[in-house]
Image (spheres, rainbow, N blue to C red):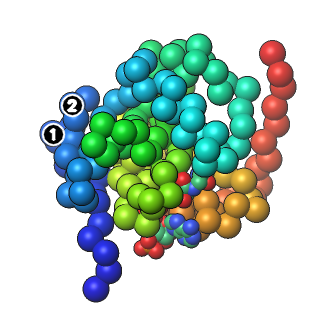
Amino acid sequence: MGRPKVRAAATSVYHRAVTQLPDRNVQLRDATDEDIPALLSLWKDENVTASLTDSPAAVRLAIATATAVLVAVDDGAVIGCLIATFDGWRGNMYRLAVRPPHRRRGIASALVLEGERRLRAAGARRITALIESDHDWAVSFWERAGYELDRRMGRWAKML
Ligand SMILES: CC(C)(COP(=O)(O)OP(=O)(O)OC[C@H]1O[C@@H](n2cnc3c(N)ncnc32)[C@H](O)[C@@H]1OP(=O)(O)O)[C@@H](O)C(=O)NCCC(=O)NCCS
């Protein structure tokens, strides 16, 4: 007997609408510009690796252009999020986080499943996620979500 698990929004009824999940009052929906301060504090508070794009302008651009910026909301408060993007070649996932009191209830899994659904619908056939290898909890989560470390590849980056 485990805890009741939230499940990703039922596949056919999401359509960019608020979706009720069967755990407390948690819902998944698309982020709006009004969520930007909550997203930035979520990432800061939960030690999601700091990024060059942790700014209101960059998050506004992501909301406008990413395949999906998803938020999990409990009673109006943003308690989880995920950015999912398809660039025409690969799908990518970024900035997954869930507030501590809401963890281990399947909320991140629901966000990832919905992100996968959006990316598949956009045309993606393969999804990658950047995960810090010494963040054991994150490695465990992504393994459980079905993702495998590609040992042949490294991340190469250049600042613009
Ligand atoms: C990683 C994180 C998003 C997981 O969120 P969550 O909503 O608790 O995840 P879920 O409840 O969907 O977990 C699903 C499964 O992932 C694994 N998992 C999740 N958190 C874990 C942890 N802390 N340690 C080990 N395994 C974990 C478990 O197998 C879990 O299933 P179980 O609860 O039946 O054991 C959350 O811990 C978090 O926000 N951490 C800080 C930010 C971060 O590291 N983000 C990841 C960036 S790559």
Choose between 52 and 11: the one closer to the eye: 52
Residue at image x 34%, y 30%? 30
* Residue at (21, 31) in percent of width and height: 17
Which mark, residue 152? none
Q: Is residue 128 visible?
A: no
Q: Position of residue 57 (x, y in %)?
A: 59, 13
Q: Is residue 119 left or right of residue 19?
A: right
Q: Amino acid at mark 1?
A: Val
Mark 2, residue position? 17
Image depth: mark 1 or mark 2 in front: 2
Label 2: which secondary element: loop
Tell whether 74 sits left or right of 20: right
**Residue 13, image x, y percentages:** 15, 39
Q: Is residue 21 visible?
A: yes
**Spatial distance from mark 1 to mark 2, Cα to Cα?**
8 Å
Label 2 neighbour load within 10 Å: few <14, some 14-19, many 20+: few
At 33% from the left and 42% from the top, the residue drawn is 73
Secondary structure found at label 1:
loop
Establish if 144 lies above or below 115.
below
- Tell me the quadrant of the picture where the C terminus can be found: top right
- What residue is disc 1 on? 13
Q: Quadrant of residue 70?
A: top left
Quadrant (top left/top right/bottom left/bottom right) for the N terminus: bottom left
Along the viewing direction, whichever of 151 and 115 lies nearer the viewer: 115
- Binning the other alpha carbons within 10 Å of mark 1 as few (below 14), some (14 to 19) or many (20 upward) gives few
Q: Position of residue 114 (x, y in %)?
A: 34, 45
In this view, 18 is above or below 47? above
Q: Position of residue 101 (x, y in %)?
A: 44, 59
